[in-house]
């Protein structure tokens, strides 16, 4: 399998390059698995970014968003990894209830700074506060994955990528807020769109920062097929 996930990326490539990176570097994740033995795969998410990543990587899948809203009462003591995994499991379980013959993939991405979870911004003021905090600060992007297969088999895992932001001026932050790209994004930025200009370095999986660690997913699918 070709692995790009442990590399350090300096972001000097054109925007929207992530699909090209996926096609060049991750397409083997599917061919490593005998296609005839792959169970039906369902993406339990309405995220267009995760859909784009799976499509670019060559997977065949259906999209079935969870029918219930995300829980807001998870224990406060959860670590960022446990938090992301629990939400991923919740999403997968919601969809698996009516698709017991398939492998259902749930995913949730959070940003963490010094152990503090930063989710999606509530409004422009909140987004400004988040981006100000992330400016010139390394932070962790964590995606929890839950894969629920036939017979109630399931796997939980998480991927962590460290992202280092460049210093951002008040004017740059204001301009990005005005663009509206922050809406619905963990950490209030979208690296696959125009926020890449604010990122100095990525240590880890690039696809994880977009919203779905393809290397980790390939490993989970292999384990699912063998068990």
Image (cartoon, rainbow, N blue to C red):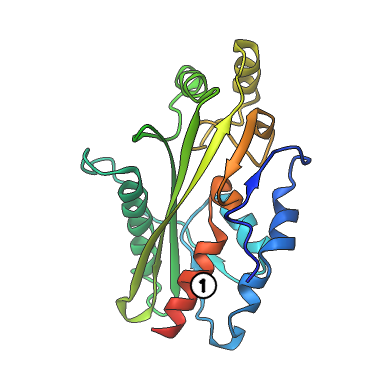
- Confirm whether residue 69 shows in the render: no
**In which quadrant is the C terminus drawn?**
bottom left
Along the viewing direction, whichever of 49 and 142 lies nearer the viewer: 142
Q: Residue at x 50, y 63 (%)?
A: 216
- Confirm whether residue 116 shows in the render: yes
In the current view of this chain or complex, which residue is farthest to the bottom? 36
Along the viewing direction, whichever of 114 and 187 lies nearer the viewer: 114
| Residue on which the image places disc 1 | 41
Q: Residue 146, image x and y in percent?
A: 39, 62
Looking at the image, residue 18 lies above or below residue 200: below
**In which quadrant is the N terminus drawn?**
bottom right
On screen, residue 43 versus residue 30, left or right, reads left
Q: Residue at x 39, y 64 (%)?
A: 95
Looking at the image, residue 60 lies above or below residue 226: above
Q: Residue 140, image x and y in percent?
A: 46, 39
Q: How many marks?
A: 1
Q: Residue at x 55, y 23 (%)?
A: 136
Q: Residue 39, image x and y in percent?
A: 50, 80
Q: Residue 168, image x and y in percent?
A: 61, 18
């Amino acid at each position: 399998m070709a692995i790009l996930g442990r590399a350090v990326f300096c972001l000097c490539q054109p925007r929207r390059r992530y699909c090209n990176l996926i096609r060049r570097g991750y397409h083997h994740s599917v061919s490593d698995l005998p296609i005839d033995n792959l169970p039906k795969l369902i993406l339990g998410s309405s995220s267009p970014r995760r859909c784009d990543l799976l499509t670019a990587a060559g997977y065949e899948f259906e999209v079935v968003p969870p029918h219930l809203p995300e829980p807001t009462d998870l224990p406060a003591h959860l670590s960022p990894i446990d938090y992301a995994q629990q939400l991923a499991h919740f999403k997968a379980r919601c969809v698996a209830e009516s698709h017991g013959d398939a492998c259902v993939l749930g995913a949730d991405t959070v940003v963490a700074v010094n152990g503090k979870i930063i989710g999606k911004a509530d409004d422009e003021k909140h987004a400004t506060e988040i981006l100000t905090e992330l400016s010139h600060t390394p932070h962790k992007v964590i995606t929890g994955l839950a894969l629920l297969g036939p017979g109630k088999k399931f796997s939980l895992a998480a991927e962590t990528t460290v992202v280092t932001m460049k210093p951002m001026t008040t004017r740059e932050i204001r301009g990005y807020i005005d663009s509206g790209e922050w809406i619905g994004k963990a950490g209030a930025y979208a690296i696959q769109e125009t926020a890449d200009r604010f990122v100095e370095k990525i240590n880890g999986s690039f696809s994880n920062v977009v919203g779905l660690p393809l290397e980790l997913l390939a490993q989970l699918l292999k384990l699912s097929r063998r068990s």
